[in-house]
Image (spheres, rainbow, N blue to C red):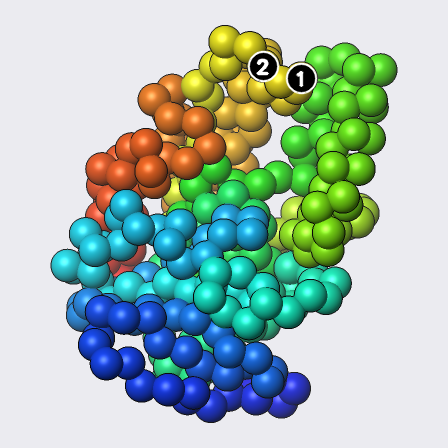
């Protein structure tokens, strides 16, 4: 793999304790990360939109007991440099690769990602398939969210989608949404190889759905969407939960940890 020349990598500081976040410089900006645990398998945890590495607090320490586990805050999030620019998921994926490069991680990782982070993980796995041993997506953001809404009620969906776009833009330069709304045609991630893939998706219903997307019908379609996507891979599996909403790692940390263990066991069974 050709080294990404436009990204400058250098250690910025050393922590007082191995338990404290550390920093590296990526493309001239400080990136916060944490690297703990030991083991044959390395996990890379990708947080959701606008979230930092604390997104993984409920499961991080448990995962470090068995695996080398890396979590980080994308530039603009957490305690990383608060830069403001139009980002694409491809740029975020390149910065994830840069972090692996500076940490000298050459073996393929098990990429665990939540929400918009799963969007980045899919792009990463498609762009750099040799760097990903297995993929685990938790409540993954999907370009087909709006398709679900339109299928339920086109006129109402268009009104709600327009308002969501306005709200996103009103919040400032929310890079993940700019990337999300702008992509056409929709990517299919056909470049992702035949690797173990696991998806955890919530089908829990809402008492008072704020949007068509949260109606009972949409919840069922959401679950089926991710089930079909995961099971399109020969080694794919979907876990549908009705015990948590968008943050299973907070509401059901034991489910997330158990699924990571299962995914690693699946990987070990096929890896010499």
Q: Residue 223 in the image: state x and y as whole percent.
A: 50, 25
The answer to whether residue 44 of the structure is visible from this angle is no
Residue at the spot 38% in from the left edge and 20% down from the top edge:
242
Is residue 175 shown above or below 11?
Answer: above
Q: Residue at x 34, y 40 (%)?
A: 249
Percent x, y of residue 44? 38, 62
The one nearer the camera, 108 or 207, is 207
Q: Which residue is label 2 attached to?
A: 209
Q: Which residue lies at the image location 27% right of the left edge and 39% below the top edge?
A: 253
Circle 1 packing at 10 Å, graded few (<14), some (14-19), many (20+), is many
Residue 143 versus residue 17: which sits nearer the camera? 17
User: Which quadrant of the figure has residue 67?
Assistant: bottom left
Residue at 37%, 31% (x, y): give it.
Answer: 239
Q: Quarter of the image containing the C terminus?
A: bottom left
Residue 230 image position (x, y, % from top left):
48, 38
Q: Which residue is mark 1?
A: 212
Up/down of 75 relative to 262, above or below: below
Is disc 2 surrounded by few (<14), some (14 to 19) or many (20+) residues within 10 Å? few
x, y (%) of residue 48?
A: 50, 49
Is residue 177 left or right of 116 when viewed as pictured?
A: right
Q: Nearer the viewer, residue 118 or 130?
A: 118
38 on left or right of 267: left
SS of the residue at dot 1?
helix
Q: Which residue, as the protein is rendered here, is positioned at the far left?
A: 65
Label 2 vs label 1: CA separation?
7 Å
| In the rendered image, the vertical position of residue 88 relative to residue 163, given as above or below | below
The circle on residue 21 is none
Question: Is residue 56 shown to the viewer in this render?
Answer: yes
């Amino acid at each position: 793999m050709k080294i990404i020349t436009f990204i400058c990598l250098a250690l910025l500081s050393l922590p007082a304790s191995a338990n404290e976040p550390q920093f590296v410089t990526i493309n001239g900006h400080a990136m916060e990360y944490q690297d703990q645990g030991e083991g044959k398998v390395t996990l890379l945890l990708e947080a959701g939109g606008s979230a930092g590495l604390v997104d993984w607090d409920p499961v991080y320490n448990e995962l470090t007991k068995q695996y080398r586990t890396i979590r980080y805050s994308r530039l603009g999030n957490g305690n990383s440099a608060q830069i403001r620019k139009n980002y694409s998921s491809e740029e975020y994926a390149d910065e994830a690769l840069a972090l692996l490069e500076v940490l000298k991680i050459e073996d393929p990782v098990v990429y665990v990602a939540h929400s918009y982070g799963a969007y980045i993980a899919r792009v990463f796995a498609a762009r750099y398939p040799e760097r990903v041993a297995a993929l685990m997506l938790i409540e993954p953001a999907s370009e087909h969210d709006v398709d679900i809404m339109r299928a339920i009620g086109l006129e109402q969906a268009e009104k709600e989608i327009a308002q969501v776009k306005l709200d996103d833009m009103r919040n400032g330069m929310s890079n993940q949404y700019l990337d999300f709304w702008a992509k056409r045609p929709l990517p299919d991630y056909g470049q992702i190889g035949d690797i173990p893939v696991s998806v955890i998706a919530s089908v829990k219903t809402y008492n008072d759905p704020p949007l068509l997307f949260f109606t009972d019908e949409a919840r069922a379609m959401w679950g089926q969407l991710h089930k079909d996507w995961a099971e399109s891979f020969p080694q794919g599996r979907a876990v549908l939960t009705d015990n948590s909403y968008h943050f299973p790692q907070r509401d059901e940390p034991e489910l997330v940890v158990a699924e990571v263990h299962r995914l690693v066991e699946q990987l070990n069974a096929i890896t010499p």
